[in-house]
């Protein structure tokens, strides 16, 4: 059902945009910063993290452009090894000062900082010392990192995201380092449990140290559709949602493992180690909101037990048709949706899926939601007269925002929208070939050029959207 114009975005809606430290800042070894696991493991076929968009040195210019765009809020992440080069212990003053100056600059320009604490960039030293997220030792180190941030930035920052896309380590294992000697699936469930404990501790710490702040996770989610109305496929889609969405959201919201996922783990010998007090901790840390990264929906069908388990393969080249689907034998396998368009990287463009997902989450949890990422990765062309005509980006964002408006009409408590990304930055999988921003950064993977900022057509479009509070999409 569609609503007429009577449904509008709330007056105090956070019209925002997002970035992440390792993709945007550059300066990967400057002013005392040490390396993170993404600095080390980023796709070697493309640009590395040493310069990226050079935001570290150009943040004032970048904030000025945010102001011109009219942004009410800005989601960015903090690099753990910039603040704590040894992962813990001594605080790197220069690193903290960078974030303080950024936050001040945002505040002076009337832009609300929305801070992600962990966006994939674990300090290499902690990975080497005890295997990073595979060890419970990280829970205290993460809590210490959070404590430093709440102390240093807590007066100015009132919105915090604990962990970005915990859900995606199941689909994109390259974001984490796993021990090749041990069974992968078991490690994933262990890490998931440990991460959720770390997330829960961060929530408690935030409430103690900055009681007037709000905190929640940022999860990457895609609703699953059945390929056909064959009951086996419908059940496969439900279970795909249980394993890829509700496993995480139920843990965050109720501190509880879903029964069917738990039984699967038991039957396959992959249950995480639960220590005394774990479940109580999880149950006591209900977030204030859910952050949702949404790019696409997925289609699944039943997968017979005889099939081989397979991770999804990622299309890194931007040539359509290269993605191979995930298979979870006896449960579901991925398939293609013939009813929607796909990006050059095979991401299925489905704006209605966003409304469906928002409604599902609202029905289950009745909690405020913010879209922490949504956008289209594309090869943008800079014309000779220095323009980027990215109508495809405008089209993508427009249809998703229209579905957000409808979801608000359905009763979803949506309080913000952060398109990915504010400015061009390093795509984790595909370097600078795959761009997302409202602002073009003049560089390629091979040539850093002058890193000039150039406003794309989508910049002017989003400016109008914000100016009209979403009336003019
Ligand atoms: C999300 C990540 C972002 C960003 C985005 C686009 O999973 O949170 O950091 O990278 O996806 O992905 P990509 O750059 O691979 O196209």
Image (tube, rainbow, N blue to C red):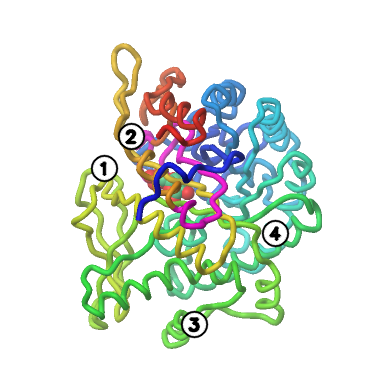
Along the line of sight, which residue is nearer the eye, 340 or 85? 340
Residue that badge 2 annotates: 433
Q: Position of residue 137 (x, y in %)?
A: 67, 66
Whether 281 is drawn above or below 473: the answer is below
The reply, left or right, for residue 402 in relation to residue 95 is left
Residue 293 visible to the viewer: yes
Q: Is mark 1 within 8 Å of ligand 1?
A: no
Q: Is residue 328 above or below residue 352?
A: below
Instruction: Where is residue 249? Give x, y as percent.
Output: 53, 67
Within 10 Å of disc 1 (Cα), the crowding (few <14, some 14-19, many 20+) is some
Which residue is at a point 66% across and 66% down the rendered structure image? Answer: 286
Looking at the rendering, the stretch of residues picked out in magenta corresponds to: 407-435
In three-dimensional space, the C-alpha distance between marks 4 and 3, rounded to whole angstroms, equals 25 Å
Give the spatial CA distance, label 3 vs label 1: 37 Å
* Sequence-earlier tag: 4 or 1: 4
Q: Quadrant of residue 458?
A: top left
Number of the label disc, if any, that sits on residue 262 = 3
Q: Could you tell which of marks 3 and 2 lies nearer the N-terminus?
A: 3
Marks 2 and 1: in contact by CB < 8 Å?
Answer: yes
Q: Position of residue 236 (x, y in %)?
A: 31, 75
Residue assigned mark 1: 318
Numbered tag placed on residue 428 in the rendering: none
Local secondary structure at mark 4? helix
Q: Is 88 on the left or on the right of 270, as rendered?
A: right
Q: Is residue 235 magenta?
A: no
């Amino acid at each position: 059902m569609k609503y007429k114009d009577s449904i509008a975005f709330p007056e105090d809606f956070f019209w925002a945009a997002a970035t992440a430290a390792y993709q945007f800042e550059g300066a990967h070894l400057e002013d005392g910063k040490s390396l993170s696991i993404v600095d080390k493991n980023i796709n070697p076929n493309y640009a590395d993290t040493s310069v990226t968009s050079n935001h570290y040195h150009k943040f004032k210019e970048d904030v000025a452009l945010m102001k011109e765009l009219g942004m009410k809020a800005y989601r960015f992440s903090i690099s753990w090894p910039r603040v704590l080069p040894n992962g813990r212990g001594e605080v790197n003053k220069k690193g903290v000062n960078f974030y303080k100056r950024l936050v001040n600059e945002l505040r002076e320009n009337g832009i609300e900082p929305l801070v992600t604490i962990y966006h994939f960039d674990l300090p290499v030293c902690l990975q080497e010392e005890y295997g990073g997220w595979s060890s419970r030792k990280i829970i205290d180190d993460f809590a210490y990192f959070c404590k430093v941030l709440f102390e240093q930035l807590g007066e100015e920052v009132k919105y915090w995201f604990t962990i970005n896309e915990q859900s995606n380590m199941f689909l994109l294992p390259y974001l984490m380092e796993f021990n090749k000697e041990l069974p992968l699936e078991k490690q994933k469930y262990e890490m998931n449990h440990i991460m959720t404990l770390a997330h829960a501790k961060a929530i408690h710490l935030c409430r103690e140290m900055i009681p007037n702040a709000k905190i929640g996770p940022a999860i990457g989610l895609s609703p699953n559709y059945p390929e056909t109305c064959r009951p086996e496929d419908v059940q496969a889609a439900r279970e795909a949602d249980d394993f890829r969405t509700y496993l995480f959201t139920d843990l965050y919201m109720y501190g509880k493992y879903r029964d069917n996922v738990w039984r699967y783990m038991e039957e396959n010998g992959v249950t995480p180690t639960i220590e005394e007090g774990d479940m109580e901790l999880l149950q006591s840390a209900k977030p204030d909101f859910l952050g949702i990264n949404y790019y696409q929906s997925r289609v699944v069908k039943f997968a017979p037990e005889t099939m081989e388990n397979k991770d999804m393969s990622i299309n890194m080249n931007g040539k359509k048709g290269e993605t191979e689907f995930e298979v979870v034998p006896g449960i579901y396998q991925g398939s293609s949706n013939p009813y929607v368009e796909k990006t050059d990287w095979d991401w299925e463009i489905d704006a209605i899926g966003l409304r469906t997902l928002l409604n599902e989450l609202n029905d289950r949890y009745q909690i405020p939601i913010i879209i922490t990422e949504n956008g289209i990765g594309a090869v943008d062309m800079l014309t000779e007269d220095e323009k980027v005509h990215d109508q495809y980006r405008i089209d993508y964002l427009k249809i998703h925002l229209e579905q957000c408006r409808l979801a608000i009409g359905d009763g979803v408590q949506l309080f913000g929208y952060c398109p990915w990304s504010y400015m061009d930055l390093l795509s984790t999988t595909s370097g600078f070939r795959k761009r997302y921003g409202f602002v073009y950064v003049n560089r390629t993977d091979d040539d850093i050029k002058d890193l000039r900022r150039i406003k794309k057509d989508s910049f002017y479009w989003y400016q109008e959207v914000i100016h009209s509070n979403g009336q003019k999409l």
